[in-house]
Each structure stands twice: as structure tokens, then as C-alpha cells.
Amino acid sequence: MDIGLIVGEVLNPASMMWIMVGVLAGLLVGVIPGLTATVAIALLVPLTFSLDPLHSLLMLTGIFSGSMYSNSITSITLRTPGNPAGAVTILDGYPLALKGQAGRAVGLACWASVIGGLLGVIALTFLAPPLAAIALRFSPAEYFAVGILGLTTVIAVSGRSVPRAIVATAFGLLIGTVGMDPLVTQARFTFGQRELTTGIPFLPAVIGLFALAEVFRLAGERNLGSRAVATIGKVIPTRADIRQTARPITLGSVIGILVGILPGGGGAMASFLAYGESRRYSKHPEEYGKGSVEGLTAADAANNGVTGGAMVPLLTLGIPGDAVTAVMLGALMVQGIQPGPRLFEGGGTLVYPLFLGMFIANILMFVIGMALAKPLASIAMVPYSILLPGIAMFSFVGAFAATGRVYDLWVALAFGLIGYLMNKFDYSIAAVALGLILGPIIESNLRRSLVMSHGDWSIFVTRPISLGVLLVAAVLLIFTVVQQQRRRANADFLVE
Amino acid sequence: MTAQSSNPEAEEVLNQPPPEATGSLGWQLALPVGLLALGVLILVASRQFPDTAAARTSPGLYPGIVSAVLIVACLLAIAELLTVRRRHAGAVRKQQVDTNENERRISKMTWARAVAVTALSILYVIATPHAGFVLTTFSYCFAISLMLRGWSVRGLVGALLIAAGLVAAAYYAFAVGLNAPLPRGRWF
């Protein structure tokens, strides 16, 4: 397709307006606790029905980018993740906010998201065909290995105790087994309850684990007179911050793109992996979890890097990479667009303008995101007498809005109590959440691999990519255990 | 930060025992023991799923593996907890002596507040299918806000305004703006 035509398709007032509407809508909806990019797109899809396919796609990508970033704002200011990846943003974003640097954290999250998003679009544009070809060669054994790597990463970043991190992860994995078996018709752990046959609904569970648990925790705080965030400083990142975060942002973006390309990957796995890897290569790993801008930006760059990566299998193979792209697939099909290799035939009249549109959406997100960052971040300045009932109410409303079932309110409440207890006794709730996300992926790929190999477990170590990924996971786990032992030995020495 | 730090705050932090070393051992053990019991139950249940034609991928295979991992990890976590508490026994005794009556009173008060918010949340979920979104959410937000603002005319008026504002914001954002469903009650 002629480059002039592509530019003309996108750089016209109508296209630009729909991209901007999408970004704004994504930012506004995504900042509400509990409303993930998936929910934002699902709720806003009806707005695109009257548009032509290109404008519809442009608006959807605008919503995607905007909501992915604005989800970080509530993670930083309210310790309430808007999406699963927000669990990683909390690790360093919230401590920064508690230090009075909410504005800096939000500004850097925006910067990292934009760079991650732009690099993701570049990757999508130039590397889509060869990268999709590599992902196509993945068998269930490789997907299983990547899932295990994701779990070891979350164990590595989950606090001071490896056994407690494994307990939390295994608990999350077990929750993921509730419902119908993925391969055969057999209900598991449903106790005859019809609602449980579809499994534990993820969104209400995550809202409960993070948002409601925080409400219960805050209610038990001694000094409710003080606010969670003292001051909101400058939002625009300084040159020093940009220099300091260049490496983690690049690393996070690359991990985000690669994970996004893998079906089933998604922002959460990318953020966890990027956070763990950036901590490993950091000169200041001890700052991670206490307000490290490196950890924050690595996670956010990965989260938005996924947006470009996840579009690769969606557009070239018609396979959604995660929940967001699954909803987008549905939206495209409503428009009569069938994603797949044929989209690229005949000069790709739809996909190449879409790539340029995604690029522009990220730039617009930066401009609008930075302009609105301060008012949005100021949510955290609201007194607790407004904040606490506000978070509780939006949590319940968010849990209900996804499916419209009262049952989901109970799920959110139950997970709120679980999250509160786990937080209180220093068990990682992020590990529970990731176990819950990755559990079904790991199980179905484990069992498909065993079917392929006729029950031979060596399939996981005889395939080079699977073996390599599993070795990385094993080394990471051993490294984490050794590091913890060293820390404990040092602490014992100090006590004596 | 090192042991030789001249910073008194840093030294105070270094002298603090880890969180699991303080508080009641019974409470500390409740979660890992509870999860251990859950792991055992799931391990037993996973062995009772009927075999399928592809027996090697039976529905119980994966839950069985994960529950075994959970059991081992819970045992390790319990062992770790007991070890940490034994190592810091001296520091914990000192902290218990330092805890005065006033501290205990504040601790009870904050604990009561957390329990009250939890109880209100349970009531909210029970009442919503009957009384609908507007009434229950208003009452829920009002009760939490009033508890945090304190019993006074100013607190009462403020809590009323906050509850009304929050319910209006949620209603217009979700039901009107986004056309998203909100809970409907049987009575309203």
C-alpha cells in the first residue's frame, strides 16, 4: 500500500478525532478501580458500531492504549490495580506515592507506557511476520515452560520468604482449577454450585484481593487522619529520571513485546517478568519494592509493550493474545472484519493505517496523559472518609459490572477477606493473582503436552526451547533461594 | 545501611524483629495450617476423579501436583515461622514488656474498626439483591464515612453528602454514562 495513502487515511480530522476520543475514553474509564482495559473496551464497543471499520479499529486501539496506562494511576495512588498487571505497578508505585512522589510516579508510568507502546507498534509493523512464525512453532510444551517461568519470576519478587511465596502461588493455581476441566467434561471442586462450573471469575477475585483487602486494611490503620499520599509533586519526568529509567524501560518494552506475541501471555506476565529481570540487572535491587523508579517503569513499559505484541497473533493468525485482544476480536467480528493472514493481502488497506493509528494513539496518550496526570493523581488526596467508602463502592460496582451477577459480589468479598489475611501475614497476594491467571494456561498446556507425548514427561526437556526456558526458571528459583539464605544469614549476624 | 550506622532511625529499624516474630503464634500459624489442610483435602479429592480414556491426563493430575506443592510449601513456611520466632524470642519479649495499656486500647479500637467495615461489607452484599443498588450503597457509604468522621453534626452532614455524592457518581458513570448494569433489588 502506498505510504501517502496510509498517511492520508490516518492524518485526517475524522481519524484523528476518533483516536483522541478512544484515548480519552480509555483514560477516563481505566482510571476507575476495577475497570480493566478489557472491561473498558467491552463497555465502549457499542460506541464503535456506527463507525466504518478503520475508524472503529482506531478508536478501539485508542481505548486499549489509554486504559492500559490509566490503570497504573489507581495502582500508584490508591494501591488499587485496575488490571492484573497493576499488581506489579503497586510494588514500587505505591511506596513512591507514600513518599510524596505520586506525581513523579504517575509521570514516569506514563513515559514508560508511551515508550513501551511505541516500541510495541514498531515491532508490530516490522517484525510481525517473522515473530509470528516463531510463536507458531511453539507447542504446548513451550507454553507450559513459559508459564512455569512466569511463576518462578513471581516467586522471586514476592517478598522475603520463598516458602510463603510458593504457598501463595500454589493457592492461586488451585483456585484456578475450580470449574470445568479444560480437556474433558468433568466439573472440579464446584460442590454442585452452577456458578462455579465456569470457574472463579477473575475480575471480581482480583478486585477483592487488591481493592477490598486494602479497604479492610486501611480501616484497621491507626492514623487515618493522615492521607495515603502527602503531596503530588512534579509530573513531567526529569532528565535524570529519564536517563535512570532508559535501561529498564527498554528491557521492559522488549519483554512486553515478546510476551505479548505469545498467546496467553498478556500484560500481567510481561510486567512480572520485566520487573524480575530489571531487578536482576539493576545496580540497586535493594530499592525494589520500596519505591524504585526502575521497577515501576520496567513493569509499565512491559504492560504497554504488550499492546503491540498482542496484536501480532491477533492480526496475523486471528488468535487473541490475552483477554483484551479477545474482546477486540469480538469487536472486529461485529464490524465484519475477520482477523488473519488475509488482512495483509491486497496491500493491507486496513492493517497499515491501523499501525500508524496505533503509533499516533500512543503519542496522543502521552500528551493527554501528562496533561491529565495531575488531576487524576490527585484522587489520592481525597480524605479517607471519602476514599474508603469510594474504593469499596467502586470495587463492588466494578465486580458486578463485568457480568451483572450478585454472585460476583460474594466472590469479591471473599477474596477481599483472603487478601486482607494474606497481606496481614505477609503472603503475596500478587502471587495468588498470577497463579490464578496462569493456572489454566499451565494446566491445559501440561496436559496437552502429555497427550502429545503419550504420557512421556521427557517432552519438556527434549524440546530445546522448552528445556531452555525451564532451565532459566530453575536457575532463577535457585538464585532466589540462595539470595534469601544470604539475607537471613546477614540478619542473624546483626541480631547476634 | 550497615550495623555500624550512626543513624538512630536506621538502628531502630535494624533492631526491629521481622513481623512474623511478633504477635500471637496461634494467629501466625492459622493461615499456613489452614492452607495445609486445604492442600490435603484437595490432594485426597484429586485422587477420586474418575479416570477418562486418556487416563494419563485425568482431571485430578494437575490439582494433585499443585496441592502436593502447597503441602510441602506450607510445611516449610511453618518451619520457617517457628525458626524465626525462636531466633527473635528475646526481642519479642522486650517488645511485649514495652507494650502499655494505651497501646492495647488503640489496637483494640483499630481492630474493631476493621471488623466493623468487614461486617458492613457482608451486610451490603446480603442486602443488595433485596434493597437494590441506590439504597444499600448509600447506607453502606454513609456508615463507613460516619465511622471515620466521628459522631458529630459536622460528621453526620459530611457523611450524608459523601454517601449521596458517591452514589450519584457511580450511578451516572455506570448506569447512564456506560450503560453498565447496576444491582437491582427485589423491593426497589
Image: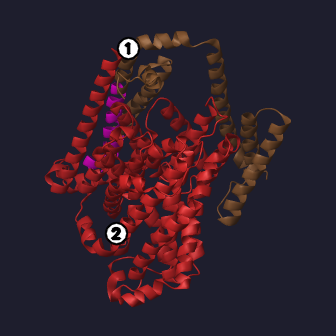
Q: Position of residue B84 (x, y in %)?
A: 37, 19
Give the residue type at disc 1. Answer: Arg
Q: Position of residue B1 (x, y in %)?
A: 37, 29
The 10 Å Cα crowd at callout 2, few under 14, some 14 to 19, many 20 or more, is many
Residue at point 72%, 61% (across, down) = B172
Answer with left or right where residue A162 lies relative to residue A360.
left
Image vertical order of residue A27 relative to residue B46, above or below: below
Q: Is residue A19 visible?
A: yes
Front residue of B184 and A20: A20
Dot 2 falls on a residue whose secondary structure is: helix
Question: Which residue position holds label 2?
Answer: A313
Residue at point 76%, 47% (across, down) = B163
Nearest-to-viewer mark from 2 and 1 = 1
Looking at the rendered structure, whether the residues under marks 2 and 1 are on a common chain is answered as: no
Chain A appears what colour?
red
Label disc, if present, on residue B86 of the rendered structure: 1
Q: Quadrant of the C terminus of chain A?
A: top left
The 10 Å Cα crowd at callout 1, few under 14, some 14 to 19, many 20 or more, is few
Subunit bearing disc 2: A
Front residue of A80 and A310: A80
Image vertical order of residue A51 relative to residue A87, above or below: below
Q: Is residue A81 visible?
A: no
Chain B appears what colour?
brown
Residue stretch in magenta:
B49-76
Front residue of A36 and B123: A36
Answer with left or right where residue A409 lies relative to residue A432.
right
Give the residue type at disc 2. Answer: Pro
Q: Is residue A299 magenta?
A: no
Dot 1 falls on a residue whose secondary structure is: helix
Residue at point 49%, 34% (across, down) = A423
Q: Position of residue A494 (x, y in %)?
A: 33, 19
